[in-house]
Amino acid sequence: MSDSPARHLNLAGASNFRDLGGYPARNDRRIRWRQIFRSNHLGHLTDGDIEVVRGLGVRSAFDFRGRVERAEALCGMAEITVHSLPVEPTVVAALRAIAATGTPLSTVHATEVMRDSYRSYVQQNTPRFRTLFAHLLEDSAPLVIHCTAGKDRTGFACALILYTLGVPDQVISEDYLLTNRFYRRDPTASSDLPDDVKQVLGSVQTSFLAAAFEAIDADYGDLEDYLRDGLGLGAAERAEFEARYLEA
């Protein structure tokens, strides 16, 4: 729709900052614009960026970065209430461990380590995502969800949000893959890794997200059971969630 707000906000100090609004959802409704945003970290916002984010009325940030990551780049806006939901990063350490055995690193290693990290979101970090949904049921919007790059931990969280609101699977996948268009990879990150491996780490693939959903099926039966038993979203919570984030 030509009169819809911009989905991606081109900030100088944060990439991949975009709105989950406007997507088709359950019962021919749509997600409300300017309520839920996703981004990479907010530690390098410029003065101009701060004015843009302030204009959006963002009140809360849900930060999935690990403890060291967060300490290195704190949120640049004092008026935003930051909720730390740490999911510790494992990918670079896992790749360095493989390299330490003398095995030359390849994109195959990188892809499988990324898939393992997505499985761990379900197997080891479900309580963090459950806490996120508990907050989302409170009066904390407009809000932003982020990690360091805003693509993996954030991508999984946002896929769960979109599914909960009844967004079609294909649209969820398309939103997830927008990261490959908007994320600006830090060229100095993990500089000891081969360039082709860093390219995998700086992008998203449908197989990454699929690995998380496979872990959900293995551990919970299916995604509906995960929402109920893993994330604490019963029928009443689902109805409240829809009332809060879907257009009337």
Image (tube, rainbow, N blue to C red):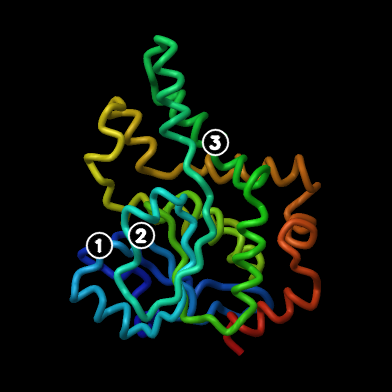
Q: Residue at x 40, y 17 (%)?
A: 99
**Above or below 49: residue 210:** above
Left or right of 177 on screen, residue 245: right
Q: Quadrant of residue 98?
A: top left
Return the disc, 1 or 3, that comes first in the chain's sequence: 1
Q: Residue at x 53, y 81 (%)?
A: 140
Residue to which mark 2 is pinned: 41
Instruction: Give SS at disc 1.
Output: loop
Q: What is the x, y in percent for residue 162?
A: 58, 65
Residue to which mark 3 is pinned: 115
Residue to which mark 1 is pinned: 44
Number of the label disc, if any, that sits on residue 77:
none
Q: Mark 2 against mark 3, which lies toward the viewer?
A: 2
CA gap, disc 1 and disc 2: 8 Å
Q: Nearer the viewer, residue 238 or 61?
A: 61
Instruction: Give SS at disc 2.
Output: loop
**Above or below 54: residue 178:** above
Q: Residue furthest top?
A: 102
Q: Residue at x 74, y 75 (%)?
A: 237
Disc 1 residue type? Answer: His
Q: Quadrant of residue 48?
A: bottom left
Disc 2 residue type? Answer: His
Left or right of 125 on screen, residue 42: left
